[in-house]
Image: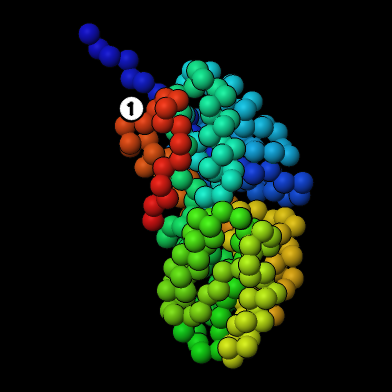
Amino acid sequence: MQRTRQPAPALVVVAHGSRDPRTPRTVAALLHRVRELRPGLDVRLGHVELNAPLLPDTLAALGDREAVLVPLLLGRGHHVKHDIPASVAAAPALHARVAPPLGPHPLLVEALYDRLTEAGWPAADRGARDAAVVLAAAGSRDPESAAGTRRTARLLGERLGGVPVLAAYASAAAPTVPAAVRALAARGHHRIAVASCFTAPGRFAAAAAAHAPWIAAAPLGAHPAMARLLLHRYDETRAAGPAAYGTPMNTPLAASA
């Protein structure tokens, strides 16, 4: 008897949500790239807050399907550790697993690097003594999230040929972006860029860019590496096998690089 091939688990991209009208457009463009890369994959969107569809509604619509939830978030903060698993636990019919957040990862660094070069970072000026970068992120009180951002900063510094990169935060953690700029200037760096470790335009990204003494990169947005990273997180979580699905396993995997 020929077995019926089971459909691949749905990919549920979990975005934070924003009052900035540019954010939903940016997320939609990113998901369009994901669908182009993986035709036929059921790709859905759910928001933690502020925008529709909210994550519980997206999960309810899946019924008893298998799904992999990939946070469109860059660190292991409260939303990844608590809010998203709680939404999955409230949908008992769903067979799901929550993937790690997008950072840290080399594909994230690729997108950060490209956004910097688009903003005017001189690709031939690798390792310039007077240049430095502030990696601006949203911030979290969770120390694991801050550690991930610092690791991303180190990876970006290596990608830039040894340029100093200092992690800074828009809220909830120190240093702030202005404090990081002052610290780098005190070390003798006269060209200080701000790399935007934000998934989409918004209040935090705009505030961070406003403190750039030299150039400010755009948010990551629908960069092709971000689409590939979403699919990478989906694939590695799905590869954990059938035992990965089900309520007892609805916890985020450890972040991988």
- Position of the C terminus by quadrant: bottom left
Residue 191, horizontal then vertical, whole percent: 62, 85
Q: Residue at x 69, y 56 (%)?
A: 201
Identity of the residue furthest to the left in this view: 1
- With respect to residue 246, does 177 lie above or below? below
Crowd tier of the residue under label 1, counting other residues whose Cα lies within 10 Å: few below 14, some 14–19, many 20 or above? few
Left or right of 107 on screen, residue 206: right
Q: Residue at x 55, y 22 (%)?
A: 91
Eyeballing the image, is 162 above or below 93?
A: below
Can the viewer see residue 178? yes
Mark 1 residue type: Pro
Tag 1, which secondary structure? helix
Viewer-side residue, 122 vs 79: 79
Q: Classify 108 as above or below 33.
A: below
Q: Residue tagged by mark 1? A: 242
Q: Quadrant of the N terminus?
A: top left
How far across and how far down the image is residue 132, in percent?
Answer: 56, 80
Judging from the image, the colouring scheme is rainbow
Residue 57, how many percent across, how many down? 64, 26
Where residue 46 sits in the image (x, y, percent)? 61, 34
Q: Identify the residue at horizontal 60%, vertical 83% (top origin).
A: 184
Circle count: 1
Q: Residue at x 53, y 26 (%)?
A: 89
Above or below — where is 38 with respect to 135? above
Residue 95 falls in which quadrant of the image?
Answer: top left
Would you say residue 224 is visible in this rendering? no
Res 220 → quadrant: bottom right
